Image (cartoon, rainbow, N blue to C red):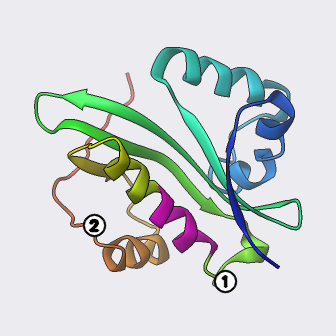
């Protein structure tokens, strides 16, 4: 069956990505999910894009376009998740290539993402996909 890429815009479409998002972001609550995505869209131009096959979400990404003094204009990938039942089937690669092409289409200078230090499989994918480890990300609770 042929996979397709779809940018999710309607509430029902966004909600269809919840179970996949929750696999990476277990703190998310279903009753707040669409409202949270809408807030991110309004404040940060956050977009949700999916790989769909047989009307099922196989992989999902959330991304934003950002400008900073350090890196100029760039596409920032907040979330990149393949549904656990669909891993190792090329869906992440389809989505990855789409994200890179999206950055090129709008003439962005770079693509960025952060990844938890424990996500070794994801790191292998990112390095194979052409990313370099260029900095450390620091955080603290306040």
- Bin the neighbour count of mark 2 within 10 Å (Cα to Cα): few under 14, some 14-19, many 20 and up: some
Q: Is residue 96 magenta?
A: yes
Q: Residue at x 38, y 33 (%)?
A: 65
Query: Does the image show residue 113?
Result: no
- Indicate the quadrant where residue 37 lies: top right
In the image, the segment drawn in magenta is 91-98
- Indicate the quadrant where residue 132 lies: bottom left
Q: x, y (%) of residue 58? A: 74, 65
What kind of element bears circle 2? loop
Q: Residue at x 61, y 60 (%)?
A: 81
Query: Nearest the camera: 136 or 9?
Result: 9
**Residue labelled with disc 1:** 89
**Residue labelled with disc 2:** 131
Whether tag 2 and tag 1 are in contact, CB under 8 A, the answer is no
> In the rendered view, would you say 104 is above or below 117?
above
Q: x, y (%) of residue 140? A: 33, 33
> In the rendered view, would you say 134 is above or below 14?
below
Q: x, y (%) of residue 48? A: 62, 41
* Dot 2 or dot 1, earlier in sequence: 1
> In the rendered view, would you say 74 is above or below 93?
above
What kind of element bears circle 1? loop
């Amino acid at each position: 069956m042929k996979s397709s890429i779809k940018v999710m815009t309607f509430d029902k479409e966004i909600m269809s990505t919840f179970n996949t998002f929750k696999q990476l972001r277990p703190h998310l609550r279903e009753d707040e999910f669409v409202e949270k995505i809408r807030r991110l869209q309004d404040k940060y131009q956050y977009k949700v894009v999916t790989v769909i096959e047989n009307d099922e979400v196989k992989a999902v990404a959330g991304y934003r376009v950002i400008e900073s003094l350090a890196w100029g204009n760039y596409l920032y990938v907040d979330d990149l998740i393949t549904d656990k039942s669909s891993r190792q089937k090329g869906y992440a690669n389809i989505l990855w290539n789409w994200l890179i092409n999206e950055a090129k289409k709008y003439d962005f200078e770079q693509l960025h993402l952060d990844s938890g230090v424990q996500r070794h499989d994801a790191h292998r994918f990112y390095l194979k996909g052409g990313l370099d480890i260029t900095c450390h990300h620091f955080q603290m609770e306040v």
